[in-house]
Amino acid sequence: MDAYRERLVDPLLKELLGELPALMLVGPRAAGKTTTAARHTNSTIRLDQPRQAAAFRADPDSALSELKEPVLLDEWQEVPEVLGAVKRSVDLDSRPGRFVLTGSIRADMDTATWPGTGRVVRVSMFPLTVSERLGCSSRPLVDRIVAGETLLPARDSPDLRGYVELALEGGFPDAVFAASQRARNRWLGSYVDQMITRDALTIEQGRDPARLGRFFEAYSLNSAGLAEDKTIYDAAGINRRTAVAYEGLLRNLLMVQDVPAWTSNRLKRLVRSSKRYLVDPGLLVGVLGVDVAGVLGDGDLLGRVLDTFVAAEFRSQATVVEPFCRMFHLRQQQGRREIDLLLEVGAGRLIGIEIKASSAPTSKDGAHLAWLRDELGDRFVAGLVLHTGPSVYGLGERITAVPISALWS
């Protein structure tokens, strides 16, 4: 990686450090949190390095007072006493822009070491989006939809194969900017292996890495899906209790993230189960060893890869847009109607997203969006059928077919 890529979260960090005393940047391991945070701070302390950690273990309050602010406290969970020192310092002096904390996995899970509520504000950061990889300065698609702007594809919009290639590259900087495809695949495989065999044990001792690995493989095969719990734990050869524990562990590792079901008193018989997602589509390479040809030759896997890819792009955008944006999915019982993603933006207004591995979707592909539009009226902002073709065109009132590349155009 030869140069820093501006991240979506950079303007937000700058703004919040001008108004708040302490921030915590949270996200998956190796997503680039430390590199980004260091660009907004004057001092960096790596608490996973024994020589730097020693002073903070001995007297964290004194050690903090010697540093030029803003201070980055990286891997703070290695010396949890430092958070108490941050709390005490902020209580005495609440000037903005004093501390940024970054850490992996265990971050603020242990409530016994968490005095930060009301003092340390969390900011989420996920792996690279395509716009970040390319160095684009485009506004998040959600903002453009809400503003009613004309949506356009990227100048060099990919074809179906190109989208799959982008998805399987993933967004972890060390993988994206690897010198070769072979090196990228090895990095992703090593990442999954280390998370399962080492990092998982830092959260829960005694877990069997082999069984956890089988569960993660079964989960990955069902990314962007609503498979019954039993389907997944039977495939992994474990019982329900173990599966629940493993899924919680993977969430805490920030390798997976659920998208909850959207519900409404006006619409009956909606499924309430969450939709499971890998947090980054590149993990499919690490856990399953899939390649572009394999994905293109498997219709079910192709749909999951594109859905996981698009959801990852929106997930990153949702952390920075205004008004506040939340992601949901919608499905009626027996699957009569289903919408891949719903984005709720301020005051319950909704954007519906369908994702199609097609270069020329028709009005039939937007039928479920039209149904939701008619049910919600003015609360329905817009419906997008995201597709792999080159063109933008209307499919009905407030429903538009748009190339996936509009996410970063």
Image (spheres, helix red, strand yellow):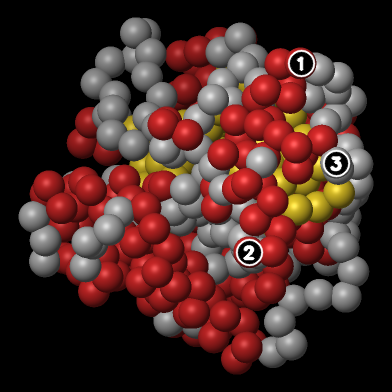
User: Reading the chain from its start, which is encountered first: label 2 or label 3?
Assistant: 2
Q: Which residue is mark 3?
A: 66
Which residue sits furthest front? 58
Number of residues whose C-alpha sits closer than 10 Å to that of mark 2, classed few (under 14), some (14–19) or many (20 or more): few
Point 67% across, 23% down: residue:
88
Q: Which residue is mark 1?
A: 92
Q: CA distance from mark 2 to mark 1?
A: 28 Å
Q: Residue at x 21, y 46 (%)?
A: 244
Apparent side of residue 297 relative to residue 390 in the rendered image (left or right): left
> In the rendered image, which residue does mark 2 sit on?
50
The residue under the point 54% across, 86% down is 186
Task: Give percent across and percent down for residue 314.
Answer: 63, 43
Q: Quadrant of residue 18?
A: top right
Three-letter amino acid code of the residue under disc 2? Pro
The residue lying toward the viewer, choosing from 210 and 329, is 210
Q: Is residue 296 left or right of residue 386?
A: left
User: Quick check: 39 left or right of 35?
Assistant: right
Disc number at residue 296? none
Residue drawn at (50%, 73%) of the image: 191
**Is the residue marked by circle 3 packed among few (<14), some (14-19), or many (20+) residues within 10 Å?**
few
- Residue 376 in view: yes
Local crowd at mark 1 within 10 Å, few (<14), some, or many (≥20)? few
- Could you tell me which secondary element the residue under label 2 belongs to? helix
- Contact between marks 2 and 3 (CB within 8 A): the answer is no
